[in-house]
Image: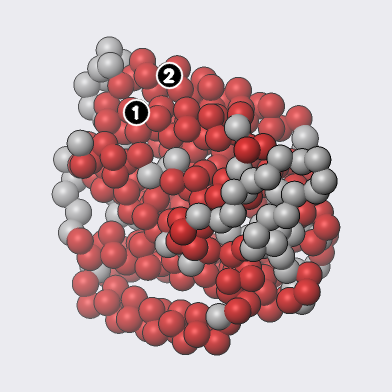
Amino acid sequence: MPPETVIREPLVSHPAKGEPSKPSPWPLAWVSAAAVDAPLVCVGWLWLLASEGHAVRPLSEGTVLGFSVWLAYMADRWFDGWRLKKADTNSFRHRYVLANRTTIGIIWSIVLIVTVIYAVNRLPPELLRRGSVLLAVVLVYFGAIHLGPRWLRRSVPKEIATALILVSGMLLFLPSAGIPIPALAAIALLFFANCALIGEWESEADLGQGFGSMADRIPSSMGFTRMLLALSVGISAFAATGLYASEFRLVWLAAGLSSLLLLLLDLTQSRWNLANLRSMADIALMTPWLVLLV
């Protein structure tokens, strides 16, 4: 789910002669292009952590988190489109943004105003103060990747930064839920692995657009990432049995399922259209909804 990567991929894939045909983007790819999947991922994990930690959270907090994540992701893509020429922007989601730039800008502004007013009136002052600190960090990060020199944009560890920002956003609303550090680490690993794997799948296009990723800067890190995911599957399966601890079992179950799904997508990546592959990688992180509903 990395918000800042650019793909050189047409809306409909046309395989080269002799290559197997890949499916066109699914309707779900439009959901990903509209940045709706990232908020669903974060809110799902927030509510699962709150449920397992017996820290009931009001609907207002999930609403503010969801809209905040959407605002960040869509702003990132809008600024990507602002810096890239239409002829050179062949990713499905960035073409979507470029084709609807004015409409998205208007909707984004309305959502921002509504979110700020809603947060100021519904959230406690202490939560607003903590949120302001995280907002400052996010703005510095955005400035580095969008306004900084090229060497800075390529050197910022986007995969790590994205994972830490998303986890920090959830923790704003869960200061006293008693969440075990290993469980938080497993969730952060999922967010990081999602970004890192997508970065590797799209690394050739990223380099062509001048965007760096961990896959091209430190290729050996990808093998380590896959090893951590496989380890996460095993540890999560053990923890979900309750032999490790009776609390947060469902969190471990969801983390294990997501890790397994990411690994399976990585193994079958050659069969997917890139837009579909990216959307499926984000859907793989939505296991908290499955656990909560079941």
Percent across and percent down for residue 90 are 71, 65
Can residue 92 be seen here? The reply is yes
238 versus 25 height, above or below: above
Image quadrant where residue 133 sits: bottom left
Residue at left 73%, top 54%? 14
108 vs 146, left or right, is: left
Residue at left 27%, top 31%? 250
Residue at left 36%, top 62%? 66
Element class at badge 1: helix
Percent across and percent down for residue 149 are 80, 67
Can residue 175 be seen here? The reply is no
- Disc on res. 53: none
Distance in Å between CA atoms under marks 1 and 2: 8 Å
188 vs 173, left or right, is: right
The residue identified by callout 1 is: 252
Q: Nearer the viewer, residue 37 or 244?
A: 37
4 versus 82 height, above or below: above
Q: Which residue type carries mark 2?
A: Ile
The residue identified by callout 2 is: 235
Q: Are marks 1 and 2 in contact (CB under 8 Å)?
A: yes
Of mark 1 and mark 2, the one earlier in the sequence is: 2
Determine crowd level at label 2: few under 14, some 14-19, many 20+ residues with C-alpha closer than 10 A. some
Residue at left 23%, top 65%? 60
Image quadrant where residue 216 sits: top right
Q: Which residue type carries mark 1?
A: Trp
- Report the quarter where the C terminus lies: top left
Determine crowd level at label 1: few under 14, some 14-19, many 20+ residues with C-alpha closer than 10 A. many
